[in-house]
Image (cartoon, grey):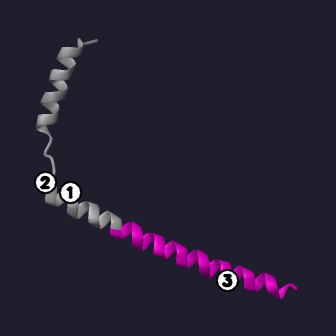
Amino acid sequence: MANPIEFLTQVRAEANKVTWPSRRETLITTALVLVMVILASIFFVSVDQALRLIVTFVLSLAH
């Protein structure tokens, strides 16, 4: 096992090799993720409500 100082030096060297996204890229990506989450939630709520209505209707026929 390497000593802690050598390990941290290696971690820093690897972190310097990473191509980090710009602030603009990060904001755009975050906005797109939020939009997709909202669209997916609207879709699933709609499907859930439609299924609820169908099941309620089918069950009301039994009475």
| Numbered badge on residue 22 | 2
User: Percent from the top left, x then y, of residue 41?
Assistant: 47, 70
Q: Where is residue 21 in the image (x, y as percent from the top left)?
A: 16, 52
Q: How crowded is mark 1: few (under 14 residues within 10 Å), some or many (20 or more)?
A: few
Asked if the residue under mark 2 is in contact with the one under mark 1, i.e. CB atoms within 8 Å, the reply is: yes
Q: Which amino acid does label 3 sit on?
A: Leu
The kind of residue on which mark 2 rests is: Ser
Quick check: is 11 in the magenta stretch?
Answer: no
Q: Is 48 placed left or right of 39 in the picture?
A: right
| Picture residue at 15% right of the left edge, 41% below the top | 18
Residue 25 location (% of width, % of height)? 17, 59
Gap between marks 1 and 3 measured at Cα: 41 Å
Secondary element at image label 2 = loop
Residue at coordinates 17% horizontally, 24% vertically from top-left?
Answer: 10
The residue segment tinted magenta is 35-63
Q: Nearer the viewer, residue 11 or 28?
A: 28
Q: What kind of element bears circle 3?
A: helix
Tell me which residue sits at (88%, 86%) in the image: 63
In three-dimensional space, the C-alpha distance between marks 2 and 3, rounded to whole angstroms, equals 47 Å
19 on left or right of 43: left
Residue where numbered disc 1 is placed = 26
